[in-house]
Image: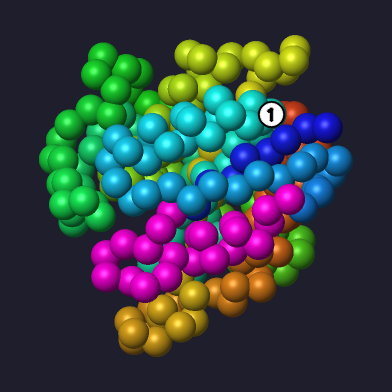
Amino acid sequence: MKTVLITAFEPFDGETINPSWESVRQLQNQQLSGAHIETRQLPCVFNTSLTCLYTAIDEIQPELVIAVGQAGGRPDITVERIAININDARIPDNQGNQPIDTPIVAAGPAAYFSTLPIKAIVSGLQAAGVPASISQSAGTYVCNHVMYGLLHYLALTYPKVRGGLVRGGFIHIPYLPEQAVKHPGTPSMALETITMALKIAINQALENSEDMVISGGTTH
C-alpha cells in the first residue's frame, strides 16, 4: 500500500494553536485513494524543522509528501508553486532564530518547483466549493524553508522509490475562526472545511501523476 506523509507546524508568533496541525492530525491512519496517511508535527524552527522532516521521510518511506502551514491573512487554500533558497525571517522562530538573507542550502539551486499537480488540486478544491488558488510565493519564513528543504531532499536522496518519483509540495491554509477573532478583519476558514480540503488535495495528488493542461497548451 502506498504511504503519504503529511506534515504541519506547531503554534508560533504568539498563537496558541496552529490550524495546519489541528487539521492534519485528523488525517492520521486514514486511507485515501488506496494510500495510508501518516502525519507528523514539525517545530516552527529553522533547520530543526528539516531535521525532523528528513527523519520522518526516512522512517516512513512515503510516495508522496505534503507539508501544510498557516498563512494568516490569506482567504483561501493556497497551493504553493515554488520555494526559493533564502531565509529572511520577519519574526524570530520558536527558538529565537531570525536568519536574514541566508541560504537554506549553501550552493543549492535558486529554487525548486512543487512536484504536486497544483492546478489539479486547485481545480478539485474549487469544484467542491472550497476557495482555493495557486500561490507564487511561499514567503521567506519557516514554511518556505521546509518546502525548499523538502524538495531538495527528495531530489537528492529519493529521486525514485519503487520505480516512481517521490513527489512533494506545500499548501498554506488560513486562520481558524477562533484565531481570526483576535485579528479583526482577517479572513478565516472552518476546521472542517480545511480538513476536507486536505483530503481532496491528497486524492488529487495521488490520482494525477501529471498536472492539468490549461488553455494555451502549457502543463505545470
Q: Nearer the viewer, residue 204 or 54?
A: 54
Task: State whether residue 208 appears in this view.
Answer: no
Q: Position of residue 37 (x, y in %)?
A: 71, 45
Q: Please give the count of numbered marks on the rendered protein.
A: 1
Q: Report the coloring of the rendering.
A: rainbow
Q: Quadrant of residue 88?
A: top left
Q: Nearer the viewer, residue 84 or 98?
A: 98
Q: Within 10 Å of the Cα at label 1, are there few (<14), some (14-19), or many (20+) other Cα atoms? A: many
Q: Is residue 190 above or below residue 125?
A: below
Q: Is residue 199 above or below residue 74?
A: above
Q: Residue at x 45, y 77 (%)?
A: 187
Identify the residue under disc 1: 63
- Asked if residue 154 lies left or right of residue 70, the reply is right
Q: Give the residue furthest to the right.
A: 34
Q: Residue at x 49, y 51 (%)?
A: 41
Can you say which quadrant of the picture contains the C terminus?
Answer: top right
Q: Position of residue 130 (x, y in %)?
A: 66, 67
Q: Is residue 193 above or below residue 154?
A: below
Q: Residue at x 28, y 29 (%)?
A: 104
Task: State whether residue 159 appears in this view.
Answer: yes
Q: Secondary structure at mark 1?
A: loop
Can you say which quadrant of the picture contains the N terminus?
Answer: top right
Mark 1 residue type: Glu
Q: Residue at x 32, y 38 (%)?
A: 48
Q: Position of residue 216 (x, y in %)?
A: 66, 33
As for residue 190 lying within the magenta part, the answer is no
As for residue 23 lying within the magenta part, the answer is yes
Q: Position of residue 219 (x, y in %)?
A: 65, 30
Per the rendered image, the range of residues in magenta is: 9-29
Q: Nearer the viewer, residue 35 or 56?
A: 56
